[in-house]
Amino acid sequence: LCVRDAYHDELAAITDQLVEMTRLVGQAVSLATQALLTSDLALAQGVIEGDDSVDLLRENVERRTVDLIARQQPVAGDLRALTTGLRITSDLERSGDLAVHVAKLARRRFPDCAVPDELQATIREMGAVAAEIVSKAGDVVASRDATRAAELDADDDVMDDLHRTLLLTMLAPEWPHGVDTAIDLALAGRYYERFADHAVAVARQVVFLVTGEAAMRI
Amino acid sequence: LCVRDAYHDELAAITDQLVEMTRLVGQAVSLATQALLTSDLALAQGVIEGDDSVDLLRENVERRTVDLIARQQPVAGDLRALTTGLRITSDLERSGDLAVHVAKLARRRFPDCAVPDELQATIREMGAVAAEIVSKAGDVVASRDATRAAELDADDDVMDDLHRTLLLTMLAPEWPHGVDTAIDLALAGRYYERFADHAVAVARQVVFLVTGEAAMRI
C-alpha cells in the first residue's frame, strides 16, 4: 500500500508539473502577443529567455516519468497515463517554442511594429484565444474531465476563423503593407494556429486516456 | 544472459523502426516537393495519406519502448537510450507532418503551381537537402556514429542559405507574383527549414546519448 501511495504521489507531482507548463506557455503567448502588438523589445526578450523554464520542466517530467516506469513497473492503465504525460509534455514544449517564435518576430521587426492598425484587433484576439485554450487544456489535465475537452474544439474553431480573417485581409487587392509584412503575419498566424492545435492535442490525449477512445476530430 | 539478449534484440528492433521512419519521411518530403513543383495532385494525395504509416510506426516505437522499460527495468545507460528513442520518434513524426504540409500546399494550389519558374530550382534544392539530411540522420541513428552528426550541421547551413534566397527573392521590389504566392512560399520555406531542424535534432539526440554532452550548436 505504501509503495502504491508513493507511486500516486509521484503521478500527482508529474501532473502538477504538466499543469505548470500550461500556465507558463499561456503566459508566454500572452506576453509575446503584447510584445508583437506594441513592439516591446524587452518583453520579447523576456519571453525568449523564459522558455528555458519550459524546457527544464519537460526534461524533469520526462526523467521522473521514466524513473517511475522503471522502478514501479506499472500495469496497463497507469502505464498509459505515464506515456500520455510524455506526449503532453512534448506538445507543451512545442507550444512554448511557438510563443518564442512570435516574440522573435517582434524582436526582428523592432523598432517597427509587425502588425498594422487594421490587424491589431485580429492578432490581439488570436493571442487571447491561444492563452485561453491552453489554460483550458491545463484544467483538463488537472481534472481529467473529458467533457470539458469539447470546449477546446469550439475555441479552436474561433482560432481558425481569426486565421482566415488574417489571411483574407492580406490577400485583398488593396493590401497596402507589402510582401514583407504579409510574410511576417502569415508566419505569426501559423504560430498561433499551431499553438492552439497543440493545446487541443493535449486535451485529446487526456480524453483518450480517460475514455480509451480517440477523439472524433483529429 | 538470455534476458539481456532478448533485451538487446528488442532495442535493435526499435532502432530499426526509427531508421525506417527516417526513410519514410525522407521519401515523403521528396515526393511532396515533386508534387509542389509539378502541381501533381495524385502525388500530393499519396503523401498526405501515406503519413499514417509514420504515425503508426511512432505509436509502435512508443509502446515497445515503454513495455521494455516496464518489463526490464533497465539501468541508467540503457534507460537513456530508450528515452532518446522516444524523443527521436517524436521528431520524426513531426517531420512527416511537415512533408504533409508541403503536399497540402501543392493540393491547395492545384491546378496552379505554387512555385514560379524563378524559384523552382531553390525549392527543388530545399527538398533535396531535406531528404539528404534526414537520410544522414538515419545513418547516425543506425551507426551511433557521433562524428557523422557534424555533416548535418553543414547541410543545415545550406538549408538556411536556400531559405534566405527564397525570402530575398520574394522581398525584392520587382517581385511580380503577388502576396498570395509569397505567403504560400514563405510557409513552404518554413516547412523545409523545420524539417531540417528536426533531422538535426535527431542526430543531436544520438550525439548526446553517445557522448553524454549536449551538442554545442542548439
Image (spheres, coloured by chain):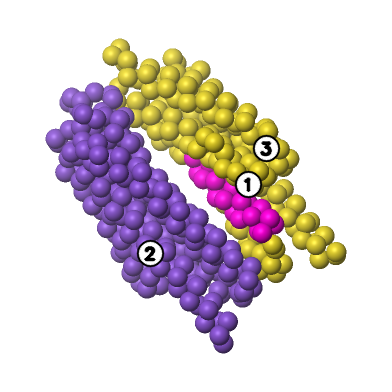
Chain colours: A yellow, B purple
Q: Position of residue A70 (x, y in %)?
A: 66, 68
Report if residue B218 is visible in the image. Answer: no
Residue B102 vertical placement versus A34 (above, below): below
Residue situated furthest right in the rendering: A1
Q: Are marks 3 and 2 on the same chain?
A: no
Q: Which residues are magenta?
A: A76-100
Label 2 near label 1: C-beta < 8 Å?
no
Q: Badge 1: few (under 14), some or many (20 or more) residues near its Cα, within 10 Å?
A: few
Under mark 1, the amino acid is: Gly
Under mark 3, the amino acid is: Ala
| Mark-to-mark CA distance, 3 and 2 | 36 Å
Residue A154 vertical placement versus A26 (above, below): above
Residue named by callout 3 = A146
Q: Chain of mark 1?
A: A
Under mark 2, the amino acid is: Val
Q: Quadrant of residue B116?
A: top left
Disc 1, SS:
loop
| Mark-to-mark CA distance, 1 and 2 | 30 Å
Q: Residue at x 67, y 32 (%)?
A: A148
Q: Nearer the viewer, residue A205 or B132?
A: A205
Residue named by callout 1 = A212
Tell me, for residue B19, which label it has, or none.
2
Tell me, for residue B185, which label it has, or none.
none
Q: Position of residue B135 (x, y in %)?
A: 31, 61
Q: Chain of mark 3?
A: A
Q: Position of residue B179 (x, y in %)?
A: 28, 24
Q: Nearer the viewer, residue B25 or A103?
A: B25
